Every structure is written in structure tokens, then in C-alpha cells.
Amino acid sequence: MAEAHQAVAFQFTVTPEGVDFRLSREALKHIYLSGINSWKRRLIRIKNGILRGVYPGSPTSWLVVVMTTLGSSYCNVDISMGLTCFIQRWLPEGCGPYRTPQTRTLLSVAIFSTGVWMMGILFFRQTLKLLLSYHGWMFEMHGQTSHFTKVWAMCVRLLSGRRPMLYSFQTSLPKLPVPSVSATIYRYLESVKHLLDDKEYYRMETLAKEFQEKTAPRLQKYLVLKSWWATNYVSDWWEEYVYLKGRTPLMVNSNYYVMDLVLVKNADVQAARLGNIVHAMIKYRHKLDREEIKPVMVLGIVPMCSYQMERMFNTTRIPGKDTDVLQHLTDSRHVAVYHKGRFFKLWLYEGSRLLRPRDLEMQFQRILDDPSPPQPGEEKLAALTAGGRAEWAQVRQAFFGSGKNKAALDAIERAAFFVALDEESHRYDPEDEASLSLYGKALLHGSCYNRWFDKSFTLIAFKNGQLGLNTEHAWADAPIIGHLWEFVLGTDSFDLGYTETGHCLGKPNPVLAPPQRLQWDIPKQCQAVIESSYQVAKALADDVELYCFQFLPFGKGLIKKCRTSPDAFVQIALQLAHFRDRGRLCLTYEASMTRMFREGRTETVRSCTCESTAFVRAMAQGRHLKADLQDLFRKAAEKHQNMYRLAMTGAGIDRHLFCLYVVSKYLGVKSPFLAEVLSEPWRLSTSQTAQFQIRMFDPNQYPNHLGAGGGFGPVANDGYGVSYMIAGENTIFFHVSSKFSSSETNAQRFGNHIRQALLDIADLFQVPKADS
């Protein structure tokens, strides 16, 4: 095949006359350019490592210190207080470059200046870390900033430097603090008191006090010791025990999806859309490798940890018998593509040059036009990544450890990311509410074998050009992939563009070698396991009910007129909706980020509080005055906002208890309290989708350039999963999931309760609403 010849730099044939060598100049040229490109990346990494290592200093600031010291010496002013003379005496004399007094003076000044410069960098860095440990600004009322906080903000801006790179602040971020056991126990009991009757609460209180007095002090000592030694006392255990050691299927249970822009349409041509999007993704990776992406800053002042971005590309989750492993490569020059049961390897570069969008469109179109059928066992092969992890690990070891199967699997696992070309068409039609739910279902699990669920993310392209992502969860949390997606969609819409016929701009290069078809040799025994994994995955997918809808009456703009945060408003509405749906309240999980700390990931906000319960019950009784209900709502909102701030600042409940539980397992200590806390089901699991992390465009000028966020499966078999995105001033998108197998839940019913709860709370404040 043509692509096979392109990949070989030289060939040789043994003849009676000897060995005949044939060199391919074109292949050698590509190898040469690839090597040059690789060395460029290495040099850039070295340069960035140096610049990051001396931040907030810079080579310019070093030169200023040197020139200042040298200038003062020429003016007979010794600002070194004799240290340059001391250094000069220790320099060897009489030979080499040190023989002239001028040279010895210059060298001693340079050494002294470098020492002062390095000490200044360390001082500024530690001062910045100390300043970033202050979180009092988060607890101040909006518009009532204290003088202390204003001075603090000025100092942070002053020490943050002018042009930070992506990882410049990593060493200046504070470590996640370990809360006291007493504070965690107090907050835990407060979070469950209204969910338990007196007898149950007394039992749990007794277990908690016994744990606090007898077991916890020993466990806490080990945890504090780890917090001193490790960068983050939670993140590595969270990744290992919550994600990588999970043996249940990733599909639905762990992976989540992200939607495309739903109110505007860029192009209908499937290959063209992919050409622009893949090109934009690799441009983002280029910026990521060079650390040219600006770090995300809270209020433009406080930097967020960026370490999760390191494994966005070239990453695959490798299955193991007892635990999985995340394999991350420093670079990958191809993507793996799936279409109609066939796998392809598509090169992203020609030599050292990234393929233009029009070239990528041509390559994807070649795959779409390829008439070859799937090989035996190839069509449903990816179902292995959708089934049980232990089964996949055994099959991988038995059938994919050598030969063409290993080479083909390596091409997928070592790809930058995975691309799925679907034959179905999906798009949100505001006139057809079910269209958004069907779109979400296709992204969440597809056919159970047309996504590679182990890859860091799968880019999904439907036949009508609509796109989406299915993302593995272990390597990072949703805001990280959201950052990439915002950049990609913004670049696609405002930088790259399309022709009038919907194709990528420019002309393709027809001499490019076509994508390479991956070859497999899958025996009958392996095919039987593939079919078994498919049946497991299909049963799981068929059991998921997903109801996605756009809430149109109002959005963030009108919620603020209630003088509360939009997130608190929605969370309290969810509590009211759940009570109306199930007749009771339940333990509720809301994901909050802890990225203001180094290597921070998430913390749980227990949204069902005593205050929200009081409001919900008062609403249900229907005999309270509106003023009383407003007062109860404001108390509930204030409590929720305070809980969220505590979680963000390292004073949450659940990660601390989780780590104490891990320590108890290591020490072989049994704790009935921890065992019960860690086994409590989250029957309402919620998350807000981040947006506008990058200002790619003005949302006021382009109000319809909105994605619909994304969603995930229910955490509990008899519970709900709710993801929502407050998409601008006038709309909110919801993604509600449940299981058909539970007689107690119904996603659409719960979604309707959410709608009504939002309207009822708005009516309390007489907030004018748009027409429904």
C-alpha cells in the first residue's frame, strides 16, 4: 500500500549479486524534519523550564541587578557591603580567564548579582505563596471589599509578574490544608442531622464521637505527615482509589460527555468540521507544550492550578487486573479514527508541518469514502473498553501482546486522541425537545462500540457535522476539557471559517498518503469476549434514561435580581424538585473545585442543608407568607454559598474523611464510622458546567454562540445525576439522568419538577420572566 511505502526510509533486497539498497529521499526528508521538530520541542521545554524556574524573575531582571551592581562599583559605591571583594579573593588568579583585574571584578559582580537575584526570586515566591493562602476575600459580601483585601489584591498583582506562562504559578500555590478532625466531624453531623430521625442521628453521633476520641488522632497524624511530604494529600489517592481501581465499566459510570454549539450551525460537512476542529485541537496542544496558554485566574487575580492540563493529549487509560494505569506520552503525531467498524491511523503532520484544515478534511473524507469491510472481530472491538475492567485487562494480555494486534492497539493507545465518525445525525432542534436528549445519549455511550472509552477523550462527529466529546474522568475534571473545547469552538467559528459550500478554506494536497488502515487478527475466543463485553455495555446503556432540556423563562441575569448566586438558586430549586419528586430529601453531592491549591481537584458541597430543608418544607406546606419564604430562601442561599466557599478553601468534609479512611485501610484499623460514611449513597449528584474560561469572543455580541454543557450517568442506581450550565443571561441547560430499572426515578418527571421549582422560587421574588 502507498502508506506502507511512505513509512519506510530504505528497502533492501538480497540477490545473487549482493544486497541492493534503495533509499527513499522523501521518507528521509520526513525523518530529518521530524528529528528537527523533536529537538525544537526539547529546546523549548528546556527554555520554558528555566523561565518557569526563575518566575517571577526574568533574564531582564537579572541583567538589571548585574548592571546596578556594576554601575555602583564604578561610582565607588559598594552596595554588596564587601561581598564582591570576598568573592574576588576566592577566584583563582594568575592564569586563564581570571588574570586581569577587570575580568575578576566583572565575574565577582556577576556571581554576587546572581545570588541576590535568586534570593529575591525565592523571597517573592514565598511571599506570593503566603498571600495566596489568604482566602478571606471569598467570604466578603459582594461590593463590600475590606481595605485589607484591597491591599492584598494589589500585592498579589504586584508579585504575579506581567506575562506568566501556564505553569509559572505552580510552585507559588499553597498546599491543600488538612482540616482538624473536630471541624470535619462537626460539619458532617450538621450535614446529616435533618436527614436522620432522632434515633439514627444519636447512633451516628455516638459513632462519630467514638471515632474522634479513639481512632482519628492516630489517622490524622499520618495524614498531616503526608500533607507535609506530598504536594497534595488528596489527589493521588483520589485518582487511584476512586478512578483507577474501579472495576465497573467506564461508560456511563465514569465517563462524561460535552456538547457542541447548539444554537448556531457552522457547517454541515462532516469531514470539513473535523478538519477545522482537529487542526484547532493540535494548535491548542502546541500552545500547551510551549506553555503559551494563560493560567486561569479567579477574578483575574488568583491563579488556579494547571497541572491537570499536562495529560490532556497523548493519554490512555490502560486496564489492569486490580488497578488501571494512565499512560501519557510526551508527543503523538497521529489520531486514531473509527468509521463503520474499521480503525484507521491518520497522520497529523507532513514532516514537521501540521496539516492544514483542508488537508485534514481530505484525509477524513478518504476514510468516509473507503469501501472496505471490517475484519473479523474488528467492528465491536471497542466494546472491550465499555465493559468490565478486569475482563478487558485479561483479554488485552492474552490477545493483544504481540504481532499485528499489538501494533494496531499501540496505534490507538499512542494516538493524540480518538475520533469517531458516526453514521447517525444529531442536532438540537428547539421545536423538538427530544432531540437534545437523543444527542446526549449518543455522546454518552453511542452504540457501545464506536467510542474508545479509555482515551483521554473521544472526538465524535455526526453525519450532519455536529460534534461532541466523550471524556475519561481519571486524568482531569470537566473544567479542563471545557477549557480546550472553548478554545476549539472559538477558533472554528471566528478564526478558521468555511467556504460558502461548507468546506475548509484553502486547497488540499492530493499527494498526501491516505490514512492507514489498522490490521487485526482477532481469534474466535477473543471475539466471544468482545461480544460478552458488548452485551454488558448494551444493558448498561439501555438502562440509562437521559432527559436534556433548555430552560428558557430566565437565566443568570434575572436570578441576580433575587440577590443570590445563580448556583445557590439552582441548587435550592433542585432540592425543592427532588422533594416533590420523591417525597423526601436526600444526601446531595455538588462538585466544587480546589484548584486554588497545588494539584487540587474537587471537593464535595453537601447541598442539602438544614436551611434548604426548612425552605423546602415551608414551600411544600403552602401556608407561609411570601416574606417568610423569602427569608428562608435567603438563609438557605447564604448557607449554600458559605458551604461552597469552605469547600473551595480546603475546609470541606468528604475528601478529609476519604483520606482518613484510606489511612485506616493501610494501618489495618477498623472504623465503623468511616465505613458507614463512605458507603452512604449520593442519590442526587449534581455539577455545574464551567463556561467562558477563555474570552475567545464577546458573548454580548454573539449571544447564540453557546454550548449546552454536558452530562453524566446517575451515581446511584435509584438516584439522579444532574448537570447544568447557566448559559448566559437568559437560559439554562439541564442534563438529567436516571435508570429505567429503578421504579422510583424518572428523568423526565424530575426535569419537569426542576422547571416548576425554578419558576416557583422566581415567583417569590416577583421576578418577571420571559414567555415559556
Image (spheres, rainbow, N blue to C red):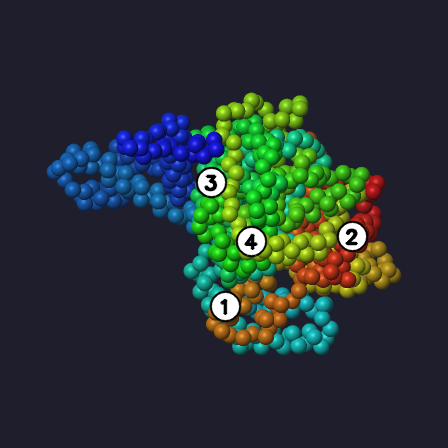
Pinpoint residue 252: horizontal percent, then vertical percent. 64, 53
Q: Amino acid at mark 1?
A: Val
- Above/below status of 483 relative to 738: above
> Is 701 drawn above or below residue 687 in the view shown?
above
Dot 1 alpha-carbon crowd within 10 angstroms: few under 14, some 14 to 19, many 20 or more: some
Q: Mark 1 or 3, which is nearer the eye?
A: 3
Which amino acid, mark 4? Lys
Picture coordinates of residue 96, whole percent (x, y) = 15, 36
Nearer the camera: disc 2 or disc 1: 2
Q: Nearer the viewer, residue 146 or 104?
A: 104
Identify the disc placed on residue 466.
none
- Could you say which quadrant of the image residue 434 lies in? top right
Q: Horizontally, is 574 left or right of 390 in the view?
A: right
Question: Which amino acid, by three-letter code, is at mark 3?
Answer: Ser
Q: In the rendered image, which quarter contains the C terminus?
A: top right
The residue tagged 1 is 663
Q: Sequence order check: which comes first, mark 1 or mark 3?
A: 3
Residue type marked 2: Gln
Residue beneath the point at 27% across and 41% down: 111
Q: Is 482 on the left or on the right of 560, as rendered?
A: left
**What residue did someone put label 4 on?**
524
- In the picture of the structure, the residue carrying the numbered disc 3 is 332
